[in-house]
Structures are given as C-alpha cells and as structure tokens.
Image (spheres, rainbow, N blue to C red):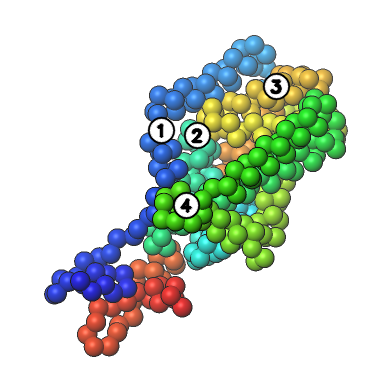
Amino acid sequence: MNRAAGRYVRKDKIFPRRNRVSPEATGTSSARARGNPAWAWVSNLGGVGLVAVLLWWLGTGPALAGLRRIDAPAVLTALALGALATVGCAWRWRLVAGGLGIRLPLGTAVADCYRAVFLNATLPGGVLGDVHRAVRHGREAGDLGRAVRAVVWERTAGQLVQVLLAAVLLLALPSPVRPYLPVAVAVAVVVGLVLAVLVRALPRSGPSRRARAVRAAAADVRAGLLGRRTGPGVLLASTAVVGCHLATFVLAARVAGVTAPLTALVPLTLLALLAMALPANVAGFGPREGVAAWAFGAAGLGAAEGVATALVYGALVLVAALPGAAVLVLRGRPSALRRRAGDRTVGTQGGSSPVPAAGLAGSA
C-alpha cells in the first residue's frame, strides 16, 4: 500500500486519510468530556442555589437597583472593553497556535473567540465555547490534537498571568486577604517547586505514553509559551485581557452605586474574578457572587453591594458577548483557512494522486 500526502492509495482505489490525534494530546479533554453528568448538574445547581441564597439572605433590592441603573454609556463601555479583551484573547491564541505550527488568521481567531465568549456566557460550565473553537480549528487545520493543545495552553497562560497579577496587586493594596497573603504566597512557591521537581523527574525518553506526553508538553511550552516570538506577546495579551476584565468589574461597581476609591475596590474585584475559575458555576454566576459578598462585607462596603456588583458585571459581560451571537448565526460561511486547506490541490507528475497544497506548505 502506497501512501501519498493526505490519501491512501491501494491499487485503483483511493481512501481519504484520517486525521490522527495522539492520546496524550487529547486524553485530558476526552476524560473531561466523559465526566460524571451528575456532578455537572450538581455543580450547576450549586451555582444557581448560591446566588438564590444570597439574594434571599441579603435582599433583592440592591441587586435590582444596580441592574436598573445599567444605561447606554455603561453598555457601550462594556462592549468596547469586551472587544479589546476578545482581540487580546484572539491574538494570544494565534501566537500559541503559531508556535505549535498551526496557521490561524487573526480575523478567524477574533470571530471564533467572540463565539466562544458568547457560548461561555450562556451555557453552564464556562468552557464549552473554548471546546467548540478548539475542535472547529482542529478540523479546519487538519490537526485536532495540536489545535486542542493550543487552546488549552492559551487558556492556561491567561489564568497564570491573572493569578500572578492578582498576587502582586493584592500584596500592594489593602484587602481582607492581605494579612494572609505572605503565607499563601510561600505555600504556593513551595508547591510550585515541588511540582517542578516532579515534572523534571518524569521520564522523557522511551515509547511509553507518559514519556510521549511529557515530551509533547515540554515542546509545546517551549514553542508556544516561552519562545522569543511568542512569550512577550502572550504576556502582553494576557495582561491586557485581565485589565479589561478588571475595568469591566470596576464599571459594574460604579453602576451598582459603590463609591469606594479604586485602591479599595480593585482588590475586591480581583478576588471575585479569581472565584470565577471555580467549577461550581453557571456561566460565571455562583462563586463570583459569594466571594464578592464576603469581600465587600469584610471591607465594610456591604455584602449586598458586593452581590449587586457581581450581578451587574455578569449582565455587562453578557451584553459584551452579544456580537458572538451574530458570529454563531453566520458560522456556516467557510473560512479562509478551510479554503486553503481543503479546496486547493496541487497535481503531481506521472498520474499520481493530487497532493493538498497545505501539506506541501507544512512540509516546507
């Protein structure tokens, strides 16, 4: 059996070649996708239940008053901040994907990120939109494994930068958690060193699945996150995205009627942003409101105002994600990447089967 680029040829029959996805590339995502449905329902209901309990305990007056105060300037500002954050995420994704060897036009990345933001803001879990863009990009690029890893590393980089910026700002500004931060940072450093030692001790040679996974992860980090052409851009884009989210949260606090100075408000909103990474939420609602209630109450600003701020933030984020709904409706339009990878072929001499142009570009 002779194998040509992109096809299998056997005598007079031609069979399309399947895209291969390495187990180490998608094992984690597949395991999550096959996760326990009961836990998914429990986590989602837990987020909704937490918001309901807070509103019952603190009253709905401040929250409803804050939502009613959302006006046109607030909506336009939220849309502008959401656009900047979406472009920053798309740029970061493009850099990481390029470092991993996958072409991703910026316009396509922006559209896919807008669609992902809308799905994340309207569906439980907060990650289904990112799963969708990873799978879509993998199918268009013809390499599902690397496309999934690109999204995973892009999201990981954004979370790490957010945690680092939050640690710096929480250490510099007064907040309810400031007395405990030195111990928390010390524990985090120790845990990080232990993990680094364990990773260094993992086998990197040999044909085992673990060794292949370690080699693939190390290569991805070097090329996609720490490379000279990708590292500075990933850091800058992640910082800009965190800044946009933080500015949106401060805007929500002002709309909700919180008049505290920025030095007191920024640490509280950072804590609420960090809480959104917890899995027990529905489109971000749940832990965000709980942490905001505790943080605002501990700072003397009122727990009810914290819940109102978090709810207004959720509403503004949903408004900022609405352009993604238009992208979702127009998703049938073929992208430039698909036209390059699937429609163009280059003929070969001697009656051989055609070779995809994208395959020639990749081999070069």
Give how far across and how far down residue 329 sits, in percent. 42, 50
Q: Nearer the viewer, mark 1 or mark 2?
A: 1
Q: Secondary structure at mark 3?
A: helix
- Find the distance from the CA under tag 3 to the CA under tag 2: 21 Å
Q: Earlier in the sequence, mark 4 or mark 1?
A: 1
**Residue 65 can be seen in this image:** no
Image x and y of residue 251, in percent: 73, 37
Q: Which mark is residue 125?
A: 2
Given residues 303 and 10, the one toward you in this image is: 10
- Which of the marked residues, 3 or 2, is nearer the chain's N terminus? 2
Q: Is residue 168 left or right of residue 351?
A: right
Question: Which mark is in front, 4 or 1?
Answer: 4
Camera sees residue 207: yes
Give the Cα separation between the discs numbered 3 and 4.
45 Å
Could you tell me how far apart the alpha carbons at marks 1 and 2 are, in whole angstroms?
Answer: 12 Å
Task: Write down the residue under mark 4.
Answer: 211
Binning the other alpha carbons within 10 Å of mark 2 as few (below 14), some (14 to 19) or many (20 upward) gives many
Dot 1 or dot 2, earlier in sequence = 1
Q: Is residue 15 above or below residue 203?
A: below
What amino acid is at disc 1? Gly
- The kind of residue tagged 2 is Gly
- Quarter where residue 341 is shown: bottom left
Disc 3 versus disc 1: distance between alpha carbons? 31 Å
Q: Which residue is mark 1?
A: 35
Q: Residue at x 50, y 46 (%)?
A: 130
**Which of the labelled discs sits on residue 293, or is there none?**
3
